[in-house]
Amino acid sequence: MSVKSISSRPLPALALAAILLMCIVSCASQIRPDQVLMKNPGNENPLVEKYNMKIAAGGLRNPAGPGLSKDYRIGPEDLLDVSVFEVKEMTSEVRVNGNGYIRLPLAGQIKAGGLTSTQLENLIAKRLDRYLQEPTVSVFIKEYRSQPISVLGAVKSPKIYYVTGQMCLLDVLSMAGGLTADAGNVCIVQNATGKAPRKQTVVNLEQLLSKGHTELNIPIHSGDIVNVPTGGVFFVDGAVSAPGSFPLKGETTVTQAISMAKGLSFEAVKSDIKIYRDAGAGRKVIAVNYDSILAGKSKDIRLRDKDIVIVPKSGFKSFVKGITTYIGLGPFGLGRSGL
């Protein structure tokens, strides 16, 4: 008995398509929220890295100030050079005592602590007005004392820094090593006024670092507290063009999040988008219909910190995309099987 040999014949196009479809469907597993967090641990933030480059480079000076010592507040242990125009006898080099006072000829004891050099010049001139006609006083800060500035929050090295001379906000952030990946887009400066509550100045870091509003690079004084609050972050994964983690700034909605992820890909299932939200003991799942939102039939949901948006892929659309790619593979494509 002879055994027939089975000749090798090309598979029909339909059979190849079926095999390809099974491979695509079997490989298209459902994305889980924990997988998204593993891929996006939150330790990278391109926007913050861009900010840090500008902080480290410097150059964003406020053209209106601070000008050398003009906005600097005099404090204990500062050494001052005081002079009166055309009155050499009034030239003095004096150190501010621990309580913030200095003593000058004719002017007597003066509270210099907490004043700028210009304010002290006016105060001394007022004291000398009874002895001299329109005295012109100059105050030069010859030596700065070590002054404490506290830097807190989302910076790489939060602590109390002891500095000399006039510092601006970006100088202080640079000393603290720059921002961390979870930094928000604002910075809160609490001014050391000596009274409670402290005066607060909120600086928009985006306006300062991205838009170049140098007037926001405000002077920082002794005893001030610089606090960079952490910002929110959300994640987008699945059938989008650029999945990843994104900073949560202001009121970010689902459609805006998808836009930040460079839009939906061809395989996206628009009617079955899911938001996984931290609910303490577990995760709350919120269903989203993208087309319904665009049509104005559904509300565009606002995202919260740590939300995970997952856009599922359509098995059929993946098959269509895969088979289209397969057909275009040159002499080995379905269209050239010779059947």
Image (spheres, rainbow, N blue to C red):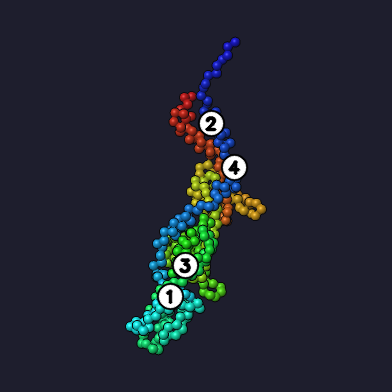
Return the mark for residue 79. 1
Tag 2: amino acid = Ala
Residue 17 badge: 2
Mark 4 to mark 2 CA distance (whole Å) = 22 Å
* Viewer can see residue 299: no
The disc, 1 or 3, on the residue closer to the chain's N-terminal end is 1
Sequence-first disc among 1 and 4: 4
> Which residue is the site of mark 4?
30
For image coordinates 50% across by 64% down, the residue present is 187
Q: Is residue 37 visible?
A: yes
Alpha-carbon distance for marks 4 and 3? 54 Å
**Do callouts 2 and 1 mark residues in contact (Cβ within 8 Å)?**
no
The structure residue drawn at horizontal position 51% and vertical position 58%, both measured from the top left corner, is: 156
Q: Residue furthest left?
A: 86
Q: Nearer the viewer, residue 237 or 66?
A: 66
Height in image: 161 above or below 255?
below
Residue behind mark 3: 163
Q: Nearer the viewer, mark 2 or mark 1?
A: 1
The amino acid marked with disc number 3 is Val
Please tell me whether mark 1 sits on a helix, a strand or a loop: strand
Please report contact status of discs 1 and 3: CB closer than 8 Å, yes or no. Answer: no
Question: In the picture shown, does residue 18 fall above or below 29?
Answer: above
- Name the kind of residue labelled 4 in the image: Gln
Distance of label 2 from label 3 (alpha carbons): 71 Å
Looking at the image, which residue sits at the far right? Answer: 281
| Label 4 with label 3: CB-CB less than 8 Å | no
* Residue 88 percent location from the top left of the image: 34, 83
